[in-house]
Amino acid sequence: MGLYRETRIREFFGEASNTNHLAWSLLVLTLGLIIWLLITLSNAENQRNALASKACQDRVFAAELDTKCLVFVQTRPHWWQHVWYAMTHLRPE
């Protein structure tokens, strides 16, 4: 049997893996989803704060909104401040 074991073809790299690919794939997908949700929450809170503080009010028509302003406005210095405010103030004002 020792002679047979030495003559068999060696396994290619990665052919017999001990890594749990399902667990790592789920971890990567979960982290991607969390990052996407943080970006979305930050953008939504930024726009909500701009609307609440009337930072994007149209200069010509006072009752209208400048929708282009909502895309580019920054109401807080950092994205994590938007996320922190959104997560700590869950009740509507």
Image: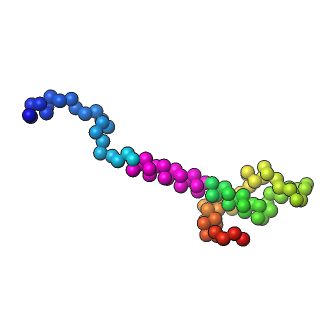
Residue drawn 76% across the image and 64% down it: 52
Looking at the image, is 91 positioned above or below residue 34?
Answer: below
Q: Could you tell me residue 11's position as x and y percent?
A: 25, 33
Residue drawn 39% across the image and 50% down it: 23
In the displayed structure, does residue 13 sit left or right of residue 83?
left
* Image quarter (top left, top right, bottom left or bottom right) of the N terminus: top left
Q: Could you tell me residue 35's position as x and y percent?
A: 55, 53
- In the rendered image, which quarter is residue 41 located in? bottom right
Dominant SS in magenta: helix
Q: Look at the image and say whether residue 2 sits in the magenta stretch.
A: no
Q: Look at the image and say whether residue 26 sits in the magenta stretch.
A: yes
* Image quarter (top left, top right, bottom left or bottom right) of the C terminus: bottom right
- In the rendered image, which quarter is residue 18 located in? top left
Q: Which residues are magenta?
A: 23-39
Looking at the image, is 46 positioned above or below residue 3?
Answer: below
Residue drawn 80% across the image and 57% down it: 56
- In the rendered image, which quarter is residue 42 located in? bottom right
Q: Could you tell me residue 22's position as x and y percent?
A: 39, 47
Residue 6 visible to an observer of this rendering: yes
How many badges with numbers are in the image? 0
Residue 81 visible to an observer of this rendering: no
The colour scheme of the drawn protein is: rainbow
Residue drawn 28% across the image and 33% down it: 12
Looking at the image, is 71 positioned above or below residue 5?
Answer: below
